[in-house]
Amino acid sequence: VRRRRREWRVVVRCREGEAEALLEYFTGGSERRKKRRREGNESTQEGQGESQDQVVEKFNQGEEGRVRKRKSRWGRVEDATTHEATSSNATNRPQTLSNQPINDSSASKLEEGTIISIGGPQHPVDVFYIQQPVSDYVQSAVETALQIHSFEQNDDDGDDDDNNDGDILCFLPTENDVEDAVAMAETALSAPSARPRTKPAVCLPLHASLPSRLRSQPFLPRTPEELRTKSRRIVFAAETSVAVPNASHVVDSGFVKTPFFDPSSGCRRSVVHPVCRTDADRRAKRAGNVRRGKCYRLYSEEYLRHSMVETAMSAPEIRRCDLTEAILTVKALGVNNALSFDWMTVPTAEALAYGLECLFALGVVDENTELTELGKEMVYFPTDPRTSRMILAALDMESRYYERGYGNDDDEDDDNDNDNPHDENGISAMTAKLIVGDIMTVAAAMQVRSLIYPPKNERHWSRYDDAMADILDRSGDHVTMVHLFDLIDHTHRMLSDEECRERFVNRGALQRAMDVRNQLHRFLKRRFGGVGGGRYPNEWLGSKRREIVGSHGFDSDERSEAIRKCVCAGFFMNVAKLNNDGRYYTLRGKYAVSISPTSVLHRYGDGSDYVLFGETCDGARGGVDVRPCSSISGLWLRQLAPHYWK
């Protein structure tokens, strides 16, 4: 990118301790490059003794100069030496340190690297430590927050538009910890013994799985009810560090969650580990954003000084993620051996082996790890290889139907569709017309989290059952997602906020999924020219789809089977089988997994022998949950991936 777009700037957001290492990587080089730089400096005419900071300062002040530059492997400049300007027409010309060329004799541009540190709080923070280690950090965090709420109160009424007491921000590692803490705090605040001695308080959760309406609530102005009752907010956040307005009390549990990918099992997990000193200091600073604050740490000062690490000990992300998509990108760049690529941090051999195994199973690379024709086509897809293979399976299913002359969108050919309702593979005309749009819907829905969220309270489950009645498909989540989008396709209107609340739908995630689906539609239409390679007038998300969905002129079971077969074509490696003990075990590796409570199979499933899933996540009881899930037939694995499941 830097070689082709030299006018672009690279901005890297990182921790304070990692800034110097990243700057050295992008602007530094090997000893040979440094030696060449020193030799180049000796050949310069003048400008000895000026540092890079002086060069930046001179150009920001508008002084004239000519900079000698030497590129590194990233096209960055490793050294700069100023010279007096010799061009008379450059006098009084305003200049800043930018990517604009300042030397007519050189085609390169001034691209110096620098570290920009964002300023911290403007108010001091008093830090308090616990004397003895706690056995349950969630319960201790809740008890500490309630004690702060009880004793750290201002007797003055103050202004109704401001909370003089200051809000309370509690940092917890996982989303389940946040939900448990909110329930514990609300129970304690609603107890009769707590009402006479405390002011009202509102407990708010904050984590990534919440709907946008709930996730943004801690950052919004106070409601009229909160202003009237002078309620204090107690925010429980599952974030490393987040700033909440009006927070002057911080409770630090001392733990943080780090996601990682296990290539041996193919599962994504999260590890809860102690925070580093840098993150602990950052959390404490959140209490001093608006006023003098206090930070309560649930660990001792001795542990902070002698046992806590200075910076995060977690491995770089490239060592904690699935490299399937990264390897495909590297091979598309012409690098046959992924190990020879100039990685910033070399990935583990296990992760590279897993990524190559997935690409080989999907047919992206051959036995020599070279891109196949299918792989060369999948390179252009904006999705991960599994999702791309799923979309290509839908396109292949549609094209095989039209190539055999079974389908046409013209009205005069409707009778022909009825005379030949199915092709030799059992696909009817209506299913063939819907399948690509359905798979685009599934692909878009899988790019967002928590599209449909189950209720937290038991009293809401009856409403949840009523809301799911008209979109539920007992085969699993993938077809249920399609039914949810059918409501939008039929009415050609986005669901309102009230409708989303009634249906327990995350409207923000639904809107993002709609945007992703539209982007996929534009890409496929540009890449493949529309239905049947552009030979037919129907569009995948056009008016014809709305007409078919609205008329229900299709076989629901056949449509459901076609959708799940296409999903299985891309995710056939993610299959679990029901064992005699009543638990599911993955076919690859024999690892025990459970269906996520957010899946419709968890409540409405029929206990299928084989379950297909898209990803794994941490379960509430320490196990591994799978989502989104759909029931499949074991015969499909041999039909769609006989080379893998022998």
Image: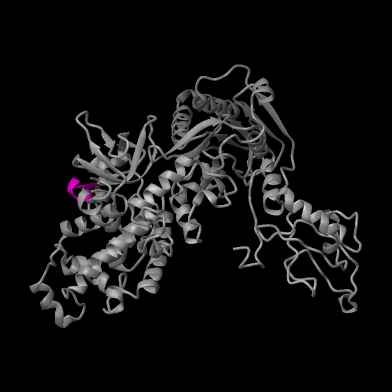
The answer to whether residue 310 is above or below residue 332 is above
The answer to whether residue 199 is above or below residue 90 is above
Q: Is residue 314 magenta?
A: no
Outermost residue toward the left in this view: 419
In x, y percent, where is residue 309?
Answer: 64, 29
Outermost residue toward the top in this view: 132
Q: Is residue 633 magenta?
A: yes
Which portion, as a residue range, is magenta? 631-637
In x, y percent, where is residue 410?
Answer: 20, 81
Query: In this rendering, does residue 115 appear at all?
Result: no
Query: In this rendering, does residue 258 appear at all?
Result: yes
The colouring scheme, among rainbow, by chain, secondary structure or one colour, is: one colour
The answer to whether residue 413 is above or below residue 70 is below
> Quadrant where the N terminus lies?
bottom right
In x, y percent, where is residue 497?
Answer: 40, 57
Q: Residue at x 80, y 72 (%)?
A: 103
Q: Nearer the viewer, residue 100 or 494?
A: 100
The answer to whether residue 143 is above or below residue 39 is above
Q: Residue at x 17, y 81 (%)?
A: 411
Outermost residue toward the bottom in this view: 412
Q: Residue at x 19, y 68 (%)?
A: 430
Left or right: 322, with 143 as reference point? left
Q: Residue at x 73, y 51 (%)?
A: 32
> Quadrant where the C terminus lies?
top left
